Amino acid sequence: MITGRRLSGARRCLFSAGFGLCLSLCLYNVSAASTIQKFSMPDLVNLAELIFEGEVTAVRSDELGDGLVYTWVRFRVADVVKGGDPGEQIELRFLGGSMNDRMLSVSDLNMPVPGERGIYFVESLAEGYVNPLLGWSQGHYLIHPDQQGEDRVYATTEPESETAVMADELSALKQKALKAKGPGPAAVGSARTSSAGLSQPEPGNTYLSPAQFKQEIRQLLEPASP
């Protein structure tokens, strides 16, 4: 049994895993029937220990004493939205990766890749997590230029797909959650997805820039008015 939180606490991200071993390739595959709790945007903001904008500068994999392969992803930190200042760089550890002739993969776990830019919701800086990003893909936002060359924020809500975060939907979600003082819907945006994997604008919606998205997060961090 492997948990998506620290091994001592399995409240939010639990999956049962079977290891398949291919002796000729020394290949392990964690093929999981995953149960990842869905979080609203206020939940993500409140529960994350660290939220930052950054760029992946390096990725390395190694085998530890437990016999499993892990991958360390190094980020250049551009801006800290929540949490203590980690400095100019931060390194997060993910379960899985490849080294020499060994590979360990975890289904539904999409690691950040070199050159990637994004906004990351880190559940905890302590090691011992399968995926340190809160809610896995729910805490993993990418930054890409749109067709006009302007940077926009995309949510990696599903493997191999990216959904642009829309200003009107995120604002409506935030207001609904604050009024109800409880969790809102899990999704923060929706859009048509092109064959290239990037969403195309829907009429009447404005996709958030990184600055706008971070401002929405900071507003959620502000104490609610009495």
Image: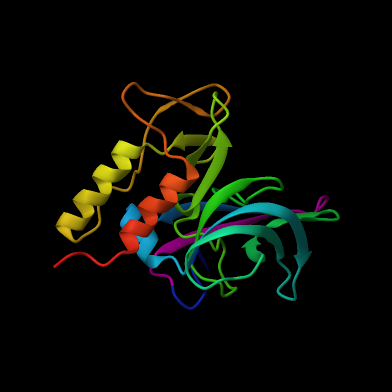
**Residue 22 horizontal/vertical position (percent):** 75, 51
Q: Against 151, is 114 above or below? A: below
Q: Residue at x 26, y 46 (%)?
A: 173
**What coloring was used for the rendering?**
rainbow
**Residue 110 horizontal/vertical position (percent):** 59, 48
* 90 falls in the magenta region: no
Span highlighted in magenta in the image: 10-26
**Extreme residue in the right direction:** 100
The answer to whether residue 91 shows anywhere in this view is: yes
Q: Against 59, is 1 above or below? A: below
Q: 194 or 205, which lies in front?
A: 205
- Looking at the image, residue 89 sits to the left or right of residue 119; the answer is right
Quarter of the image holding residue 165? top left
* 18 falls in the magenta region: yes
The C terminus appears in which quarter of the rendering?
bottom left
**Residue 26 horizontal/vertical position (percent):** 79, 55
- Looking at the image, residue 65 sits to the left or right of residue 133; the answer is right
The answer to whether residue 156 shows anywhere in this view is: no
Q: Residue at x 48, y 70 (%)?
A: 83
- Looking at the image, residue 177 sits to the left or right of residue 96; the answer is left
Q: 130 or 201, which lies in front?
A: 201
**Residue 11 horizontal/vertical position (percent):** 38, 69
Q: Residue at x 52, y 55 (%)?
A: 120
Q: Against 212, is 28 above or below? A: below
Q: 77 or 192, which lies in front?
A: 77
Quarter of the image holding residue 197? top right
Q: Residue at x 34, y 53 (%)?
A: 41
